[in-house]
Image (cartoon, coloured by chain):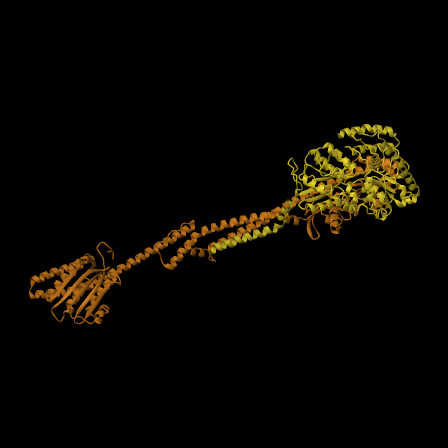
Chain colours: A yellow, B orange
């Protein structure tokens, strides 16, 4: 019918126009739709019914050149064993990790939390004591006889091991062979070093080269902690009670600390970068720190071959003090209520808790000094390091690690340290050591009891 | 509506087409106008809204930055007034004094709680430095002290200067462009500068001021004096220097405008600016409203609604017009039929609109009038014909009368008075039947009676030698036949068939045969050639006096009943003649109107 055809033509024309109009806006409409569909949920809700296995694991760590890199290598190793599991390694500032852990543990809501998290050894006691049950018992993953005692002690609570040790914080003296040589000292002089000898060398260095021996940071008392642990002491005793006023190691450490400053062999460098800058810019002859500091020293490539490593100086006036101590170090923990606990445990047991090949590779790649006893037989461990005058530094570190005295870090290391920075300030300004420590004892007792 | 009507509806000149065209064009025009108007209004409204929201955004950014400025001022004044900083920057480093000084510096700085997203760097003319956030300087102190921005600060010791640098000065800000709030440190009351404080915000930190505020069209940016984009949510703009933009902003400033429609890089934009004199910056939004409009979803919606409404209205209009024009088409069609097929008996009045109904009524009345006129004409014609028939009838009578009177005269001459009387009786009966009756049709039986009377009269004249027999079938006796129809044939037989002898038989047979009434007059007389017999029916009236009666009969039959009926004569010389008259069967009480 002619009539119908005309109607059809008109209708199709109308439709065409409307379709064309739609087409004009199609692009933005679909892009808007895409935008709204984004935002993938990274973690399933972790309430009471947490499933034990998962296809996806999340790991949090904080140092891109060190522990994050290690986690990524472990991820690659695990992918060969269990390719079904996707592991995502998230790099985050340590302070942020701590803040998120605190928030999650306080609220009991584990939404958005990782399966595996790296926690500094100084902090772990606090978590284990304050939030029992939040971290998984890893006694079946971490074999007690396979790891070094001092490290395991930090993560043990009521006989159960809650973590998988990662790095050793074995401390040492990094020193500039060239500067010491100018001051008239040889590497042999650095063996079985004492603090008295260290100061003596420092004075010589200052006199001969004009350089300081060591940089100090008013807000970081790492040096004092290292000295205490070298004598098997800490701010708290084995029972977790404040141990300040009657702590000979602390007293001696403070004495040495003041002595070094008054001797004029130190420079002040506030903050981490400033300390590294002092080393890299050649303002100091030594750095006394954990073995992990090596990567920072190595940044100054122009100083390659001018460095060597010596064992930590002994406090000769304190009984039981040795030429070995620890600084920092962290371990892997599994958050119990995040779904996939068993997968996370499986991941750790097949990587950091047993894989000597992985640990040996990490030794080479990130200068990891492991506390896994079998790691000492790895082929990379005995390799000489050109930056450190071809010294087999890993072998030395592992050797010293074995001597590190085990201490109880307690629950409040950093809270106590805040107080102790004031103490150090007063002492440096001339206050009586005994009186200051006596006062501090009371305050630290308060801090410890507040932490429970 | 049948096909014809539809095609007529779509005829190029049809009313339907014209009205539809006008209305459709009108509707489309209104739709288009509405669409354009609605679209323009929506777009204008959209631009206004976006403009308003962009202003809000800029006000928000400004508020954030002012607050930031307050914090920075706090930090820098605290450092300026801190004895620890002043000592640290004025004296040569010497532990443990420096060690405790730094500790006190940190404590004093902590009293204003500087944010962690910017680095606070303090540098003394003694080349001592301090950087917060565990950071350190990424360039040497000497380099920093000699830099252009430090020189500027030195010239304005009591002011906080905000400067954009392509490269941050701390480890945290290294590798990123940065914004630095710097101030020369001097003891109150003296203009002696002993150091500088730099609050360093990286590009990323500046970005925080725009968090979630930038979008693809508002092109938010912070612009410094030189026209360089210092920060923008759109990273690709950062660090770019746009002279055109700078000119526009400068011009707007000089006219104290804060919004202007203009073009930037050949794109029309709505330029909004806000100055932040303390920061030495402009917050600028080059709102790309064309793009925003393209991203707007409303336009398509309006178009869609407009099209839908137009389509609906068109459909309604289409149906409505076709409803209106249908009766007209019907009327047209009816009229068409009249021209094609001739006048119908009756034309329906078409129900529809008032006008069409009136038209149709008029047409109907006209047709009725025509019909009536036609009927009158026909009636007139019939009357004429009847008159003619009457005349024909009258033509027979004198002939017959003449002959009969001659016979009677002859009887009287013979003095057979009895017979003469009887003849006169019979004749008078015949005349009565012929002349007296007004009816033209009479039953066959009556006609037979007339024939018998006639035969009687003829016998008187021609004697008893000629025998006449009449057979009327019972079925035919009731049939109506025209009066005196058969009499002329009987007469002819009497006069012509037996002209040479005195003996003969005439038979008259009347019978119904199928749908017709057959009357046959058969004689065994002299006969004639068939050609002559045929001529009897076709010859002109004046040609042969004998044939007058026969032709009259034939003419009467034709006139009365049509050409189907009539007279046929079959004859053969020496054997006699048969005349056959075919008539319709008409019974009394059936159709007698003719």
Q: Position of residue A13 (x, y in %)?
A: 54, 54
Comparing A146 with B243, the one in front is A146
Locate the C terminus of chain A and report the quarter of the image it occupies: top right
Residue B164 visible? The answer is no
- Tell me: residue B14, above or below residue B58: below
Asked whether, in this view, residue B65 is left or right of residue A431, the answer is left
Q: Quadrant of residue B159?
A: top right
Of A14 and A313, nearer the camera is A313
The part of the image, by quadrant, that contains residue A269 is top right
- Asked whether residue A60 is in view, the answer is yes
Q: Position of residue A353 (x, y in %)?
A: 74, 41
- Front in this rendered view, residue B281 or B297: B297
**Observer-nearest of A204 and B291:** A204
Q: What is the residue that sits farthest to the left in this orientation?
A: B415
> Is A366 left or right of B354, judged from the image as shown?
right
Residue A449, percent across and down? 77, 28
Instruction: Indicate whether B155 appears above or below B546.
Output: above
Percent x, y of residue B298: 60, 46
Quarter of image, res A328: top right
């Amino acid at each position: 019918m002619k009539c119908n055809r005309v109607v059809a033509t008109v209708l199709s024309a109308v439709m065409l126009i409307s379709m064309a109009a739609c087409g004009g806006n199609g692009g933005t409409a679909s892009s808007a739709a895409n935008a709204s569909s984004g935002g993938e949920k990274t973690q399933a809700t972790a309430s009471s019914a947490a499933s034990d296995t998962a296809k996806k694991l999340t790991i949090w760590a904080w140092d891109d050149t060190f522990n994050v890199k290690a986690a990524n290598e472990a991820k690659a190793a695990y992918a060969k064993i269990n390719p079904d599991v996707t592991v995502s390694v998230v790099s985050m500032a340590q302070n942020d990790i701590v803040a998120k852990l605190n928030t999650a543990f306080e609220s009991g809501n584990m939404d958005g939390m990782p399966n595996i998290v790296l926690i500094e050894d100084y902090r772990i006691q606090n978590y284990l004591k304050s939030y029992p049950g939040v971290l998984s018992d890893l006694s079946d993953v971490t074999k007690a006889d396979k790891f070094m005692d001092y490290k395991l002690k930090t993560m043990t609570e009521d006989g159960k091991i809650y973590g998988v040790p990662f790095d050793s914080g074995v401390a040492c003296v990094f020193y500039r062979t060239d500067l010491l040589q100018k001051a008239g000292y040889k590497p042999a002089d650095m063996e079985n070093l004492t603090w008295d000898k260290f100061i003596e060398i420092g004075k010589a260095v200052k006199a001969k080269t004009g350089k300081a021996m060591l940089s100090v940071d008013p807000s970081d008392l790492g040096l004092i902690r290292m000295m205490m642990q070298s004598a098997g002491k800490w701010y708290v005793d084995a029972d977790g009670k404040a141990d300040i006023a009657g702590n000979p190691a602390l007293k001696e450490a403070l004495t040495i600390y003041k002595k070094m400053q008054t001797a004029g062999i130190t420079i002040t460098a506030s903050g981490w970068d400033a300390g590294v800058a002092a080393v890299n810019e050649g303002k100091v002859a030594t750095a006394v720190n954990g073995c992990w500091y090596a990567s920072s020293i190595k940044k100054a490539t122009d100083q390659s071959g001018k460095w060597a490593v010596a064992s930590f100086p002994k406090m000769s006036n304190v009984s039981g003090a040795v030429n070995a101590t620890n600084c920092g170090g962290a371990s892997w923990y599994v958050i119990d209520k995040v779904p996939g606990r068993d997968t996370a445990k499986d991941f750790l047991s097949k990587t950091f808790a047993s894989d000597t090949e992985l640990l040996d590779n990490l030794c080479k790649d990130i200068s990891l000094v492991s506390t896994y006893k079998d790691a000492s037989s790895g082929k990379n461990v005995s390799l000489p390091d050109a930056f450190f005058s071809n010294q087999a530094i890993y072998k030395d570190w592992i050797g010293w690690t074995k001597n590190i005295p085990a201490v109880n870090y307690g629950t409040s290391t950093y809270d106590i340290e805040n107080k102790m920075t004031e103490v150090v300030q007063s002492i440096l300004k001339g206050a009586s050591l005994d009186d200051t420590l006596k006062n501090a004892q009371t305050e630290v007792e308060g801090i410890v009891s507040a932490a429970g | 509506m049948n096909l014809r009507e539809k095609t007529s509806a779509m005829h190029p000149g049809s009313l339907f087409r014209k009205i539809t065209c006008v209305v459709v064009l009108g509707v489309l025009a209104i739709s288009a106008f509405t669409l354009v108007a609605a679209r323009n209004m929506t777009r204008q409204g959209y631009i206004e809204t976006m403009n308003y929201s962009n202003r809000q955004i800029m006000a928000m950014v400004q508020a954030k930055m002012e607050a930031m400025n307050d914090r920075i001022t706090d930090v820098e004044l605290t450092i300026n007034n801190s004895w620890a900083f002043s000592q640290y920057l004025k004296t040569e480093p010497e532990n443990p004094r420096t060690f405790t000084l730094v500790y006190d510096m940190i404590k004093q700085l902590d009293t204003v709680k500087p944010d962690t997203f910017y680095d606070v760097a303090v540098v003394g003319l003694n080349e001592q430095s301090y950087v917060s956030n565990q950071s350190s300087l990424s360039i040497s102190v000497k380099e920093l002290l000699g830099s252009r921005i430090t020189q500027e600060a030195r010239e304005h010791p009591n002011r906080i200067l905000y400067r954009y640098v392509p490269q941050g000065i701390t480890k945290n800000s290294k590798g990123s462009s940065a914004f630095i709030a710097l101030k020369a440190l001097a003891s109150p009351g003296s203009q002696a500068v002993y150091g500088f404080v730099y609050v360093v915000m990286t590009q990323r930190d500046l970005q925080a001021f725009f968090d979630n505020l930038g979008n693809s069209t508002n092109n938010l940016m912070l612009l410094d004096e030189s026209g360089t984009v210092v920060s923008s949510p759109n990273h690709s703009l950062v660090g770019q220097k746009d002279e055109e933009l700078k000119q526009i902003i400068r011009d707007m400033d000089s006219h104290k405008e804060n919004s202007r429609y203009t073009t930037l890089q050949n794109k029309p934009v709505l330029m909004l600016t806000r100055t932040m004199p303390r920061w030495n910056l402009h917050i600028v939004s080059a709102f790309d409203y064309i793009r925003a409009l393209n991203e707007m979803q409303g336009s398509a919606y309006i178009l869609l609604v407009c099209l839908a409404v137009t389509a609906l209205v068109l459909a309604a209009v289409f149906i409505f017009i076709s409803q209106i024009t249908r009766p007209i088409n019907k009327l047209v069609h009816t009229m068409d039929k009249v021209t094609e097929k001739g006048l119908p008996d009756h034309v329906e009045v078409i129900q529809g609109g008032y006008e069409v109904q009136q038209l149709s009524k008029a047409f109907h009345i006209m047709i009725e009038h025509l019909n009536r006129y036609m009927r009158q004409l026909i009636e007139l014609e019939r009357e004429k014909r009847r008159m003619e028939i009457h005349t024909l009838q009258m033509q027979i009578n004198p002939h017959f009368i003449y002959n009969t009177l001659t016979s009677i005269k002859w009887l009287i001459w013979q003095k057979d008075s009895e017979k003469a009387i009887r003849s006169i009786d019979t004749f008078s009966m015949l005349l009565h039947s012929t002349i007296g009756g007004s009816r033209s049709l009479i039953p066959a039986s009556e006609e037979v009676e007339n024939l018998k009377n006639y035969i009687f009269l003829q016998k008187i004249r021609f004697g008893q030698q000629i025998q006449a027999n009449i057979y009327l079938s019972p079925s035919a006796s009731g049939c109506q036949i025209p009066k005196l129809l058969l009499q002329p044939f009987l007469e002819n037989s009497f006069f012509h068939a037996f002209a040479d002898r005195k003996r003969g038989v005439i038979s008259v047979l009347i019978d119904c045969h199928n749908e017709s009434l057959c009357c046959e007059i058969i004689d065994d007389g002299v006969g004639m050639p068939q050609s002559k017999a045929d001529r009897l029916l076709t010859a002109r009236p004046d040609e042969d006096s004998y044939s007058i009666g026969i032709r009259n009969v034939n003419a009467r039959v034709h006139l009365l009943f049509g050409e189907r009926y009539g007279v046929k004569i079959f004859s053969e010389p020496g054997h006699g003649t048969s005349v056959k008259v075919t008539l319709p069967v008409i019974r009394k009480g059936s159709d007698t109107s003719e």
